[in-house]
């Protein structure tokens, strides 16, 4: 039986942690690619030397040569600069776009049939860029996915569990929209052991949780000072990969290319998605109130403006 293979591009904190999770959870063999070959090789070797302790059988290879990635089932794009205090995700736009373009082009050469998951920030714009690069090569939209909603939902779930003093396993959060300050946590569709959150917490407490969820990334950036979150983003990406490689048909919030869903077209936005071995098998359309739908469309418009800004920046420097 063929073992699954995942290429993780970027051997920084997110990429290396994702490689560790994939191996320790026995999900896939991993190739860790980074322009800094020594870092990729060193982290891969370090993780391999943990195998006798963790009793895992998955291999992790590291290097800068994309030939190592040949035949990957999934390509996880994590490379790019991380935020620093005072920076927004959008500040990374042009720099990370150049990095993503080079990496995706190289990965496609060796794994044209892979499913591509993007984590690099700003993630919705970088996923759209990946789509622009790969769609002209014939890669279908259902094989290009942005990771954000799983992370945002995980943060919201933790804040709710903390507020109610219950297990995180009881929380089913709902977060839509782009991965930014105007993401749309939907309290009405968020439940705790099946009970709507709106019946358990006051509007004031719910609004405080929504605001903290929207600012969850910068809260960690401000605390770390020299980097951004990586444990939770890595775990979130690995949950998506697990759902895909094991054909779980699991419903997770992902950044998907919309073509009319929720009245939005031509842009990647976070929505509930059924993930299977084909990538995005189905986009679920929730019945939103007018204010909720307006907020989602506003979030989508922010992503669209970011993409336009990237297009303008690239034209100026071309």
Image (cartoon, rainbow, N blue to C red):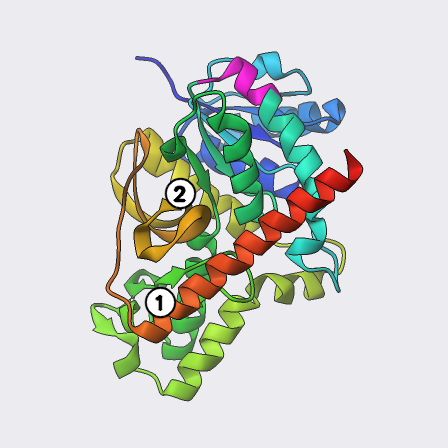
Name above or below for residue 214 compared with residue 40.
below
Q: Camera-side residue: 58 or 254? A: 254
Q: Is residue 221 visible?
A: yes
Q: Main secondary structure of the magenta part?
A: helix
**For the residue labelled by badge 2, is the local secondary structure a helix, a strand or a loop?**
helix
Name above or below for residue 263 compared with residue 238.
below
Q: Residue at x 43, y 69 (%)?
A: 295
Query: Answer yes or no: do the residues labelled 2 and 1 have beta carbons within 8 Å?
Result: no
Q: Is residue 311 magenta?
A: no
Drawn side of residue 63 relative to residue 26, left or right = right
Q: Is residue 110 magenta?
A: yes
Q: Which residue is mark 2?
A: 239
Q: CA distance from mark 2 to mark 1?
A: 27 Å
Which x, y percent locates residue 264? Answer: 38, 54
Q: Quadrant of the N terminus?
A: top left
Which x, y percent locates residue 140? Answer: 39, 28
The quadrant where residue 153 appears? bottom left
Numbered disc in front, either 2 or 1: 1
Q: Is residue 61 visible?
A: no
Q: Which residue is mark 1?
A: 293
Which x, y percent locates residue 216? Answer: 56, 65
Mark 1 Cα-neighbour bin, 10 Å: few <14, some 14–19, many ≥20: some
Name above or below for residue 80 compared with residue 37.
below
**For the residue labelled by badge 1, is the local secondary structure a helix, a strand or a loop?**
helix
Q: Camera-side residue: 140 or 23? A: 140
Mark 2 Cα-neighbour bin, 10 Å: few <14, some 14–19, many ≥20: some
For marks 2 and 1, the one nearer the N-term is 2
Report the span colored magenta: 106-112
Which x, y percent locates residue 196? Answer: 25, 74
């Amino acid at each position: 039986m063929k073992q699954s293979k995942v290429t993780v591009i970027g051997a920084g904190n997110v990429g290396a942690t994702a490689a560790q999770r994939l191996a320790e959870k026995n999900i896939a063999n991993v190739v860790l690619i980074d322009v800094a070959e020594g870092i990729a090789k060193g982290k891969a070797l370090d993780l391999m030397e943990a195998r006798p302790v963790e009793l895992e059988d998955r291999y992790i290879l590291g290097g800068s040569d994309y030939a190592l990635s040949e035949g990957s089932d999934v390509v996880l794009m994590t490379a790019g600069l991380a935020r620093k205090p005072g920076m927004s995700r959008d500040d990374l736009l042009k720099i990370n776009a150049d990095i993503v373009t080079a990496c995706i082009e190289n990965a496609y050469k060796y794994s044209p049939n892979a499913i591509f998951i993007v984590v690099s920030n700003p993630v919705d714009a970088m996923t759209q860029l990946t789509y622009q690069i790969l769609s002209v090569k014939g890669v279908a939209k259902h094989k290009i996915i942005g990771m954000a909603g799983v992370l945002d939902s995980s943060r919201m779930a933790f804040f709710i569990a903390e507020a109610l003093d219950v297990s995180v396993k009881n929380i089913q959060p709902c977060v839509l929209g782009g991965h930014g300050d105007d993401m749309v946590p939907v309290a009405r569709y968020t439940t705790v052991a099946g009970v709507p959150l709106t019946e358990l917490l006051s509007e004031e407490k719910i609004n405080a949780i929504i605001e903290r969820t929207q600012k969850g990334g910068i809260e960690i950036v401000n605390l770390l000072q020299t980097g951004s979150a990586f444990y939770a983003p890595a775990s979130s990406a690995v949950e998506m990969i697990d759902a895909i490689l094991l054909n779980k048909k699991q419903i997770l919030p992902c950044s998907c290319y919309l073509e009319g869903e929720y009245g939005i077209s031509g842009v990647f936005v976070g929505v509930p998605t059924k993930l299977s071995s084909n990538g995005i098998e189905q986009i679920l359309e929730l019945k939103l109130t007018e204010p909720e739908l307006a907020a989602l469309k506003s979030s989508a418009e922010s992503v669209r403006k970011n993409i336009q800004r990237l297009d303008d920046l690239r034209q100026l420097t071309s």
